[in-house]
Image (spheres, rainbow, N blue to C red):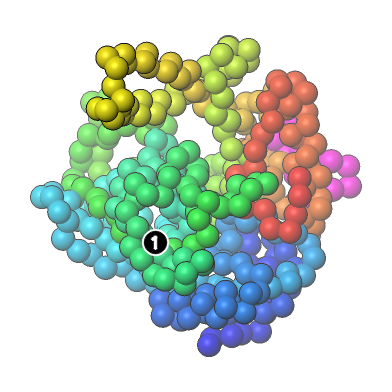
C-alpha cells in the first residue's frame, strides 16, 4: 500500500485551505487506487479522494480520516463506433488541460472550449464541467468506477450518471450527500476527428465568447489559445504569480431559476434559456385503459442567470475584502473568492456568507456554492 507522510491540504488545494490529514495514500496506478479504496472502506475510516484540489473548500482543522490522492496517468486512443470519430480512455488522475492539449494536437474536437480548466479528468464528470457552451456530457461515453457500497468495479454509461448543470449522481452538493458513493477510475470520451485545419465553430455561445461571426472558420489550436487568453484575463488559469488564481474557480454557481422568477430580476441581468427536459413517455397498461388520456403536465421553463452580475449589483466590486480579512473577491472576476495570502477557511467562509446574504436581501435569490465543502459550513 503506497502510504506516504501526510501533507497539509492547504498545500494541495487551489484555495490554499485545509489541515493535516491523519493518513495519506498516493495511488499511482489503477490497481493501487482500487486496493487503497477497498482497504479504507473496509476499515470504516472517513475518506477523501483528492485529484487536483481545484474544486474543494476544506476547513482549517486537521482532517480526521484518510486522503487518497489519485495520481494515475495515461491516455489510450481507441476506434469509435461511428466513422469520423475517435474514442479516448483517460485515467482519472490525468490533468484535464493536458487531455485538452492532447485532443487539439490530434485534431479531435469537442473539448477545446474547456481549455485551462484546472483539475483532473476523473473529477470532470462528477461536476459535469463546462465552459463557453461545451460540457463534458456532450462527449462522454462511459466511466469506469468503483462503488463504495460493494467495492465492485463496473463500467457505467454516461446516461446513467444523471449529468446536469454542474452536477451528477456522484456529486455531493452543499448540504446533501451524493446519490451514488463511488470513485471514477477512468473516463471514455468520443470526439470528432476534424484535423488541424480551419473549420466552422459550432455553438453560438462559443463563437460569441471568441468574438467570431457565424460563418467564421478557425483551427482547434486557435480556439484553445484564445480560450486560455480569456481565462487568464479572468484569473481562471492557475498562475503561482497571480493571487487571483488561488481560488476554486467560480465559488458560486450561476443560478437556475424559473422563468417567472427571472422576470422579477432587473431586465439588464444577463440570462440564458435552459433546455427543458423532454416530457416523460406516458404508459397506460392496456387492462387499465378506459379511453381517457390525461392532459400533459405543463412544466415551466427555467432560465440561467448571471450570479456574477447579481454579486456586483449587490454592491460588491471586484477585489472586495472584509476589514482585516485575507480573503477577497478576485480583482478580475466577481464569482471567484480568492485567498490573498494566508487566509483561513473561516475567513473565506465569512466572506461567502456575507455575499450570499447581500444577494439574497437584494434579489431574493440564495446563491449555492460550486466547490465541494469538506469540514466547513457556510
Q: Badge 1, how many Cα within 10 Å: few under 14, some, many 20+?
A: some
Establish if 183 lies above or below 363.
Answer: below
Q: Magenta region, mostly helix, strand or loop?
A: loop
Decide if residue 234 is on the left or right side of residue 84: right
Tell me residue 48's x, y (percent).
61, 67
| Residue at x 31%, y 14% (from the top left corner) | 292
Q: Which SS class for mark 1?
A: helix
Q: Quadrant of residue 72?
A: bottom left
| Residue at x 26%, y 68% (from the top left corner) | 76
Is residue 284 in the magenta section? no
Can you name the residue that lies furthest to the front here?
Answer: 287
Establish if 120 lies above or below 42.
Answer: above
Residue 331, visible in the rendered structure: yes
Front residue (pair 180, 303): 180
Residue 212, visible in the rendered structure: no
Tell me residue 14's x, y (percent).
62, 58
Residue tagged 1: 98
Instruction: Identify the image quadrant of the C terminus.
Output: top right
| Residue at x 48%, y 81% (from the top left corner) | 35
Tell me residue 313's x, y (percent).
70, 23
Can you name the residue that lies furthest to the right here?
Answer: 324
Front residue (pair 148, 102): 148
Tell me residue 226's x, y (percent).
40, 42
Q: Quadrant of residue 211?
A: top left
| Residue at x 23%, y 65% (from the top left corner) | 77
Query: Which residue range is magenta in the image?
Result: 315-328
Q: How many marks?
A: 1
Front residue (pair 104, 82): 82
Amino acid at each position: 500500500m503506497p502510504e506516504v507522510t501526510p501533507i497539509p491540504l492547504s498545500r494541495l488545494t487551489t484555495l490554499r485551505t485545509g489541515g493535516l490529514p491523519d493518513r495519506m495514500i498516493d495511488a499511482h496506478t489503477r490497481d493501487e487506487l482500487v486496493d487503497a479504496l477497498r482497504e479504507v472502506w473496509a476499515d470504516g475510516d472517513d475518506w477523501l479522494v483528492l485529484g487536483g484540489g481545484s474544486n474543494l473548500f476544506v476547513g482549517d482543522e486537521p482532517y480526521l480520516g484518510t486522503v487518497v490522492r489519485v495520481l494515475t496517468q495515461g491516455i489510450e486512443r481507441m476506434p469509435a463506433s461511428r466513422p469520423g470519430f475517435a474514442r479516448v480512455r483517460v485515467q482519472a488522475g490525468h490533468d484535464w488541460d493536458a487531455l485538452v492539449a492532447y485532443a487539439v494536437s490530434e485534431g479531435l474536437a469537442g473539448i477545446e472550449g474547456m481549455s485551462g480548466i484546472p483539475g483532473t479528468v476523473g473529477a470532470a464528470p462528477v461536476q459535469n464541467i463546462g465552459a463557453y457552451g461545451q460540457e463534458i456530457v456532450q462527449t462522454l461515453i462511459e466511466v469506469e468506477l468503483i462503488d463504495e457500497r460493494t467495492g465492485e468495479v463496473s463500467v457505467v454509461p454516461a446516461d446513467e450518471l444523471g449529468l446536469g448543470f454542474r452536477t451528477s449522481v456522484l456529486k455531493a452538493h452543499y448540504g446533501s450527500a451524493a446519490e451514488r458513493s463511488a470513485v471514477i477510475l477512468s473516463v471514455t470520451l468520443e470526439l470528432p476527428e476534424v484535423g488541424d485545419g480551419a473549420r466552422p465553430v459550432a455553438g453560438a455561445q462559443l463563437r460569441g465568447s471568441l468574438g467570431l461571426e457565424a460563418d467564421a472558420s478557425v483551427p482547434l489550436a486557435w480556439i484553445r489559445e484564445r480560450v486560455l487568453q480569456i481565462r487568464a484575463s479572468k484569473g481562471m488559469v492557475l498562475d503561482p504569480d497571480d493571487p487571483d488564481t488561488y481560488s476554486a474557480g467560480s465559488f458560486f454557481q450561476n443560478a437556475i431559476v424559473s422563468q417567472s422568477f427571472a422576470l422579477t430580476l432587473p431586465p439588464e441581468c444577463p440570462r440564458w434559456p435552459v433546455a427543458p427536459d423532454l416530457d416523460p413517455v406516458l404508459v397506460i397498461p392496456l387492462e387499465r385503459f378506459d379511453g381517457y388520456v390525461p392532459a400533459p403536465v405543463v412544466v415551466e421553463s427555467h432560465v440561467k442567470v448571471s450570479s456574477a452580475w447579481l454579486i456586483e449589483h449587490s454592491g460588491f466590486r471586484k477585489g472586495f475584502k472584509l476589514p482585516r480579512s485575507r480573503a477577497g473577491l478576485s480583482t478580475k472576476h466577481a464569482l471567484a473568492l480568492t485567498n490573498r495570502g494566508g487566509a483561513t477557511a473561516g475567513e473565506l467562509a465569512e466572506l461567502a456568507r456575507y455575499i450570499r446574504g447581500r444577494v439574497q436581501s437584494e434579489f431574493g435569490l440564495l446563491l449555492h456554492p460550486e466547490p465541494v465543502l469538506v469540514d466547513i459550513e457556510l
